[in-house]
Amino acid sequence: MNPALLVLPSTINIIGASYREIAETAPTSYIEVNYENMYLSYKPYNKLASEYEEAIRAAHAAGRRVPVIHAPYESWLMHVGSNGIEELANTVTSLGVKVMVFHLPSTRYGDAWQDAIKTLSRLQDKYNVEVAVENLVAAPPWSNPHRLAETANKHGISLCIDTGHLHLNGYDTAEIIDKYLDMIRVLHVHDNHGTSDEHLIVGAGTINWLRAAASIRRAAENGSWIVLEEKCIARREGISACKARLILQAASMTGMVTGWNGYRKLLEGGIRTR
Ligand SMILES: [Zn+2]
């Protein structure tokens, strides 16, 4: 697939707008559905599968497809167990989702991650979906990308590498992406100042993007989805600021992974502002 098509705006880019409106703002034919919107609007755990369905159908109605979702966080996973995880996998794969991103339960939950990862591995085969597990901020041992990769590899599961979380934990983005290139199916791209998980746009924090750019490009060429995880809360920042940022970030990331031709194609494809 053309790397330009692998750049995925996310619902996290406009928290507080309807799923339909977010999808319509995206200057791309794809969008990622992220749990953060549901988390911040206190959706109950037992209603989440239908919430994902609603979000994906809204994206379809806006003419966008949803190849990747970010599943609910680890406390949900502990709460709903394997039946709840399976219900979600069944729902989203029937709507065309190809990759599901999960956080594994940390050692705070004892060794519960072992059952979780077995369930995820089983669901991959049953629903023909790829599961990717993400490196986290402060969730031992999954804040350590090497431990995460080693465990994922044992269970035939892919990786979602999050640039912001790597930076917070003192890892070099370029080095980690290159080391695990063949296991990475999703990159979460966002920035911070190394002190809190700010989810800023690329360039607004202290990640060395000049170094990271070539690695991100290699990941895109290798078929990894590049999810824009900069977070914008509409009621704080204003909906037009969030929309403008989504569009600019999609354009600049497309430029980063494809060079000028991809950037021009995206612009010609009609960046929409409304
Ligand atoms: Zn992330």
Image (cartoon, grey):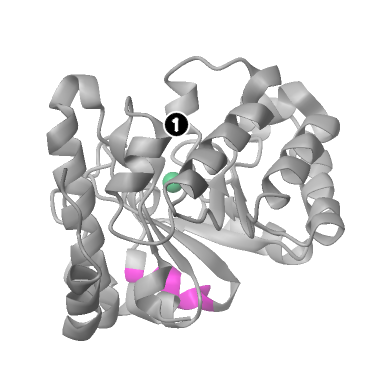
- Give the image quarter of residue 261: bottom left
Q: Which residue is depicted at the point 23% across and 45% down?
A: 192
Secondary structure beneath label 1: helix
The overriding secondary structure of the stretch rendered in magenta is helix
Q: Is residue 36 left or right of residue 154?
A: left
Q: Is residue 30 magenta?
A: no
Q: Is residue 249 left or right of residue 70?
A: left
* Position of residue 106 measured from the top left corner of the image (x, y, whole percent): 63, 35
**Between 215 and 140, which is closer to the camera in this rendering?**
215
- Does residue 238 appear in the picture of this structure? yes
**Between 161 and 256, which is closer to the camera in this rendering?**
256
Q: Which residue is depicted at the point 38% across and 29% down?
A: 18
Relative to 53, is 66 above or below? below
Relative to 51, is 253 above or below? below
* Residues rendered magenta in the picture: 174-181
Q: Is residue 177 magenta?
A: yes
**Residue type at tag 1:** Glu
* Position of residue 215 measured from the top left corner of the image (x, y, whole percent): 35, 76
Q: Residues within 10 Å of mark 1 (few under 14, many from 20)?
A: some
**Between 79 and 33, which is closer to the camera in this rendering?**
33
- Does residue 168 appear in the picture of this structure? no
Residue designated by label 1: 36
* Position of residue 123 measured from the top left corner of the image (x, y, whole percent): 82, 51
Quadrant position of the C terminus in the picture: top left
* Position of residue 30 measured from the top left corner of the image (x, y, whole percent): 44, 58
Residue at disc 1, CB closer than 8 Å to ligand 1: no
